[in-house]
Image (cartoon, grey):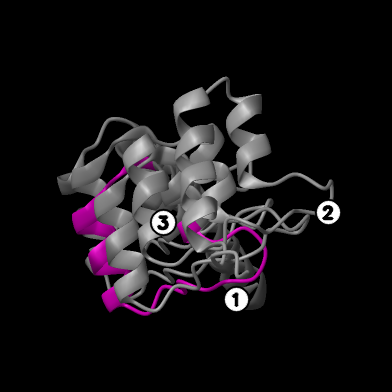
Amino acid sequence: MRKYFRYFIYLYVLIGFSSASSGSFEDFFGAVNRDDPVMVESLLKRGFDPNTPNAQGQYGLFLALREGSLKVARVLVDWPGTRVETRNAVDESALMMAALKGHADLARRLIARGADVNKTGWAPLHYAATGGHTALITMLLDAHAYIDAESPNGTTPLMMASQYGSAAAVRQLLEAGADASLKNQLGLSAQDFALRGARPEVFEMIAAHLRKQRPAATW
């Protein structure tokens, strides 16, 4: 009888723990969505794992950066148990999202915690260039990000800036040494990307840069 009693006690504790974990899961992602740092910190102190993915495979820190829940993002970046290099299902990191959204302070904190500025495939510099964020581009280059990083199909940050980013970002990358002559696996150059984005001023900026680089004719 005592053995059965002990079994029921264990079962009761297990069910209670599962219910509490389920509640914590919902509370955590709800707090991330509404940018509630007090609730998030409370859950972390009670043992909730900040690296827990939601049903879509997204992590709290990535979601906070994506949705602009910056107070929660700061708590999660600074929490020792947060793995800042955790990637989502499409290999995006928290630093990539901070770079895309222009969250410079949080990107700085992520880099200080060891976030990879040179991850293979799509890199944080691609995302900063896409968003046209010159401060983020400077920060990543200062952290030794490779300026001509290639995506899986050979697309570079300059190409992304040329179609999607700001003209200032294009100019910054060119002046920092980005190779405007490169082409991706589809045979497209940064100038082609500018044309696809209907950005003739960027096309001409790159053309002028390439003309300057050509050696003078010798007779």
- According to the picture, the residue beneath numbered tag 3 turns out to be 173
Residue placed under numbered mark 2 in the picture: 185
Picture quadrant of residue 175: bottom left
- The one nearer the camera, 156 or 131, is 156
Tag 2's secondary structure? loop
In the picture, measured across the screen, residue 164 lies left or right of residue 102, that is: right
Secondary element type, mark 1: helix
Quadrant of the rendered structure where residue 179 is? bottom right
- Three-letter code for the amino acid on which mark 3 is drawn: Leu
| Magenta region includes residue 6 | no
User: Which one is earlier in the sequence, the residue at label 2 or at label 3?
Assistant: 3
Locate residue 47, reporting x and y percent.
34, 67
Within the magenta stretch, is there residue 104?
Answer: yes
Mark 3 or mark 1, earlier in chain: 1
| In the foreground, 131 or 56 | 131
Mark 3: which secondary structure?
helix
Q: Position of residue 60 (x, y in %)?
A: 42, 50
Residue under pointer 1 = 2
Residue 74 in the image: x percent, y percent? 21, 55
Q: Which residues are magenta?
A: 101-125
Q: Quadrant of the N terminus?
A: bottom right
